[in-house]
Image: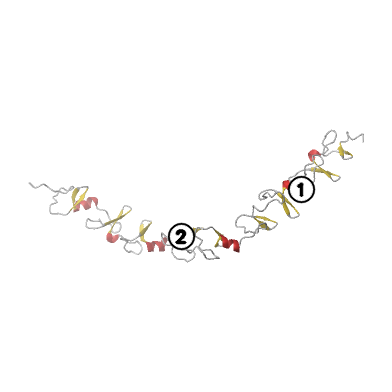
Amino acid sequence: MTERFDCHHCRESLFGRKYVLREENPHCVACFEELYANTCEECGKLIGCDCKDLSYKERHWHQGCFRCSQCRGSLVDKPFAAKEEQLLCTDCYSNEYSSRCQECRKTIMPGTRKMEYKGSSWHETCFVCHHCRRPIGTQSFIPKDSENFCVPCYEQQHAPQCVQCQKPITAGGVTYREQPWHRECFVCTACKKPLSGQRFTARDDLAYCLTCFCELYAKRCAGCTHPISGLGGTKYISFEERQWHNDCFNCKKCSLSLVGRGFLTERDDILCPDCGKDI
């Protein structure tokens, strides 16, 4: 007795008929296509056993239906891109969606090296210094008036020169008396400490930190001999070319504060009326 060879699904004999194996089970063509064949995205028909099934992200096409959505050219064995469920050949994708070079206005093809800055794109070879026309590549650059410059050209063409060191200022800087300085060059004339961000004063057009200015030029208190800066709201008393801090203007004998009071003098001493009544 001959062993039976039937379709796994409909159980009809497969002797003398075409069949398809799936998971080692034979199926007649009709059952296989009904159960397992994919539907073509383009034409909506089943992709039968006698057709090549092309797939992309769980979507399927007949070989003849696998075409660019825009120019309708075949995508079989060709590179393509996907945009919003549509498949496009590289030419159509580039013309429709790729950015254009700010310099040459040509399309920047997918996969091409490009430079991007403030929402604009350039071919790598088109992103050049406005002055020397050399590609900037990965080097630092400085924008000015909608143009880009490599650092050496910017320094040569546009950067202000520091009054102190005569070198270009490319970032930051300090302006004093309408002249530019590097922050690190703008220092106290006496102690050479940086003045940027600090309170300072000037004498004969030279800048000094407050400490040095007081030590060098401020009058000294006749009481404590420390400098009287007069800066920052410091209060002091002046009398006969001498000055005192408010806290130091006291009676020589009893130390009573004489601020706002009458007083007497004996030689160089300042006395309250009580201590000076015998003078």
Question: Where residue 14 appears, x then y in whole percent?
Answer: 14, 51
- Colour theme: secondary structure
Which element is circle 2 on? strand
Type of the residue with mark 2: Lys
Q: Identify the mark at residue 114; answer none if there is no mark.
A: 2
Q: Does 256 sit above or below residue 203?
A: above
The image quarter in which residue 155 lies = bottom right
State the residue at coordinates (60%, 63%).
156
Q: What separation in Å lies between label 2 and label 1 (alpha carbons)? A: 60 Å
Of residues 128 and 84, the one nearer the viewer is 128
Q: Is residue 144 visible?
A: no
Label 2 or label 1, whichever comes before in sequence order: 2
The residue pinned by badge 1 equals: 216
Furthest-right residue in this view: 279
Please, which residue is most extreme toward the left here? 1
Can the viewer see residue 63 in this picture? Answer: yes
Position above or below: 273 against 118: above
Which structural element holds mark 1? helix
Q: Position of residue 179 (x, y in %)?
A: 68, 58
